[in-house]
Image (cartoon, rainbow, N blue to C red):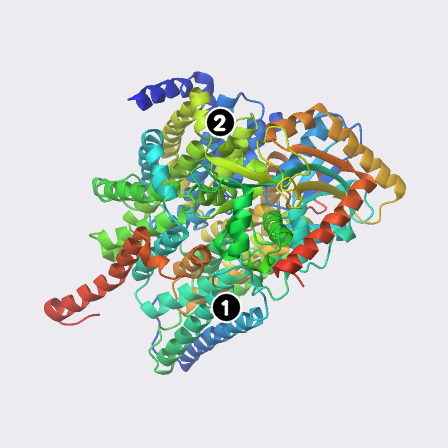
Amino acid sequence: MSASREGSGRKLGAIVVALALIAVAGIVAADAIRLGAVRTFGPGIGPRAFPWAIAIGLALLGLANLVVALRGKAVEAAPVEMGPALWVIGGLVGQIVLLSFAGFSIATGVLFGMTARGFGRGPLWLTIPIGAALSFVLYVIFTKALALTLPAGPLEKLV
Amino acid sequence: MDAFVSLAGGLAVALQPTNLLFCLIGVTLGTAVGVLPGIGPALTVALLLPVTFKLDPAGSLIMFAGIYYGGMYGGSTSSILLNTPGESSSIVTALEGNLMARAGRGGPALATAAIGSFVAGAIATLGLALLAPYVVSVALAFWPADYFSLMILAFATVSAAFGDSALRGLTSLFLGLALGLVGIDLMSGQARLDFGVPDLLDGVEVTTAAVALFAIGETLFVVSRKGAADETIEPIKGSLWMTREDWKRSWKPWLRGTAFGFPIGAMPAGGAEIPTFLSYATERRLTKHPEEFGKGAIEGVAGPEAANNASAAGTLVPLLTLGLPTSATAAIMLAGFQQYGLNPGPLLFAAKPNLVWGLIASLFVANALLLILNLPLIGLWVRLLSIPRPWLYGGILVFATLGTLGANPSLFELGSLLALGLLGFGLRVFGYPIAPVVIGLILGPMAEVQLRRALAISQNDWTVLITSPISAVLLTIAALAVILPIVLKTREKGIVFGEDD
Amino acid sequence: MPVPLRRLLAAAAILATAAAGGPALAANLKIIAPASPGGGWDQTARSMQQAMQSEKIAGSVQVENVPGAGGTIGLAQFANRAKGDPHQLIVGGYVMVGAIIMNDAPVTLDAVTPLARLTGEYEAIVVATDSPIKTIGEVIDKLKANPGSVSWGGGSAGGTDHIAAGLIAKAVGVDPTKVNYIPFSGGGESLAAVLGGQTTVGVSSYGEFDAQVKSGKLRVLAITAPERVPGIDAPTMKESGVDVEVQNWRMVAGPPGLTPEGKAEILKTIDDMAKTKTWRDTLKTKGWTDTYLAGDAFTAQLKEDIAKAHTILRDIGLAE
């Protein structure tokens, strides 16, 4: 996991992470302020107390992370190749997009194929149908044997 | 000795060939459905409930017990092998268990989980048979203030045990706490951090988050490494079975895990997660091999798995003695009883002793059957890992999304899976630990609700946290858990080593 | 993954024989359960499924779970997708009414066609047997003296239990926002709190308490029924001088835009289903009280219940 020492890009990454934490703290705090307008019933602390505590904690941690990052003492970010990761992310997005009209099997086949592609295996015209066939079997088991519902498409309508 | 006679009578019922067969079908079905990620024992039981409709009450409840334990067992199998915990109580198992599997020690990990579950289940079932009335009175003595302090103890021990950087661990924990705020606040009915999206009103589903952060985040991390596709995991390095050393390192965690799981599981708001956290933290503290934690330490699988199983038997204590369903599974068990017009509780013990003792005995039998069935299969399970990475990870993603969709067929849930998966990826890239996020997500809302309940009952009197003896003791232990290691560390630092890493 | 598959297929074979199958005499139906598998609405939907299939009232009946936000997510999806289709149904209940109001849900029950109330339960106010409180009158006196000193343990905030507590306070002239209502997420947890004397009283559907009442661990102080209920040894709220009546019901509704013929057809299906032996047996074994009310009578009752819930939730401070 240890990477090369150099690279201001890595340091920049740590700074961005710290700033993101502070931003999250801001969102939580803003929501707590919004809750201020809400009436509550009965005694005890209301729905705002914990969000405030968490927002303050996150903000402090964000600042601490920022200090560490600015001093260049943050843990090196692991070197990543985004190309293959994008294939997998694309597969997950593709599944979500296809699910409602192409049905579970085809959409999940695409996920399977694109994940394999991310790991350097293909071709997609072969892996997607393999994934779809596997998913189709799972679909039949889930919907027929367990009476659960999964999104159906043209393939699923066949059974 | 009455209980022993009754238990023996129960065993006679459970060991009747037909009932044994029902139990066998139950554990097989339960394991098969339980291995699907995102589908925990409660959902497994709910899905398979119709199968039991046609049987007589005894046979049906026995199959039930089998399905339940089978579901739990299946859940830990997928946690260890695929890093996809199907329920919140096997999240801790995934931590060390999956690391062991990747290091070629999946065999011992699965074995210690199975045997630990058996040991814990057997002891806890015995406890259920013999001690139920006493345990339940202790459990009912826990008030909201005491629960809050128990959760503080869990926070204190667990956060002290995670990661090598306190700053990074705490940062992850607070991210989890923030995620835990999303949705309708139970105590006030107000929506928080929902951004006007109705799908967010129910909050972030713990199992979705765990599967996303662990399995999806990791898949993305692995695929983005150079030469990822060509590496293979060697499924068996060293012995497939537990070695002498493994046994030596496992038996104490099994017993300690049981000691955490059974009583906390019996508490109406105890749950199965806290005992697994406490067990993990304890084992990490007591181990003679601290260097292995974070790389796959067998104690970290043995203890939490035992705790998980013992707490399951624990939830049957309030169910059978008082008729209180305190977990999702217990609620479904209650439905199982009710389909025969039976209401669990003290009356059931008196009115249908054969049935109750038959059920308790069949828990024993189910446990034993699981062990017999699954130990020989470990070799097969482990070989799953020898599947080349493209297909293995493709399969993991298929199963992860399937489990999520099966539990809640909504595109939004899949979207959350992706978003949290990206979060997990990011955390990994920048070196933040994942587990504290999930722990914050689980414990945060529980702690908040209990504190607010305590303050509502006491009408805003904060001293309940110290005036309740249970709470005072728990808070003291929590304080010690945080302070002692620091003191010890500074002493070690000063006297022995002269410097810390 | 050969192993789980093989086992799953074995499971499938066993399950297939267990599943009820019959010739398709009537239409195929789909019932939406706007909750996770296992809960009350899911059980209602699956019981309907069983009754309709085994008594051959419908061909195949499919249950689909769309959980989330007190049923409002399932409701919104149903109203959009099922429009005008007389072969789709949704199950729901009084809790959904509260959830719609509190979450300010964009899709309300106005967007569907209410068909029938199927089951219902009255709320019971209980204490542990060893509690010093013996009558509902004592609770009310305590409530009037110091509203915060009476803690009520029940289900989720804004749910039927909370509505009942608010209505009681209001009826005796106590500010409903002062009600010290303590929500619990599951039946078991709130029961434990009542049994352990953590909350002053417990308030929930009577069925939640039945086993404990019968075993002598809980005492029922009052029920929110219009008249005494056989088998429950407790006065009504009205008898005790508190004019409160609440029923926690479950219902079935159809999609919007049904033709009169379509509505009549589906109402008849439900009517037939409610009369079957399978359904009556289910009610008995599950301990559900039959409060069947169909058609226009139910629509009117529903309107009244919604208005009542809205008013009290506003009084409690949970709704605009």
C187 lies left or right of B196: left
Q: Is residue C82 above or below residue A89?
A: above
Q: Position of residue B288 (x, y in %)?
A: 20, 52
Front residue of B386/A59: it is A59
Q: Is residue B163 above or below residue B138?
A: below
Confirm whether residue C316 shows in the render.
yes
Q: Secondary structure at mark 1?
A: helix
C168 over B24 or under it: above or below:
below
- Residue B95 at what x, y percent from top left? 37, 53
In the rendered image, residues at marks 2 and 1 fall on the same chain: no
Closer to the camera in the image, C27 or C188 = C188
Viewer-nearest residue: B291 or C150 = C150
Q: Is residue B388 left or right of residue A128?
A: left
Q: Name the subunit of mark 1.
A: A
Depth check: give the residue in front, B467 or A116.
B467
Name the residue that disc number 2 marks.
B61
Q: Is residue C183 visible?
A: no
Label 1 packing within 10 angstroms: few (<14), some (14-19), many (20+): some
> Percent x, y for residue B451?
42, 58
Residue wearing tag 1: A82
Could you say whether the residue bearing mark 2 is in a helix, strand or loop?
helix
Q: Toward which corner of the image does residue C50 lie, by quadrant?
A: top right
Instruction: Give the amino acid type for the residue marked by disc 2 in the picture.
Output: Leu
Disc 2 crowd rating (10 Å Cα; few below 14, some 14-19, many 20+) is many
Of the residues shown, which amino acid type is indicated by label 1? Met
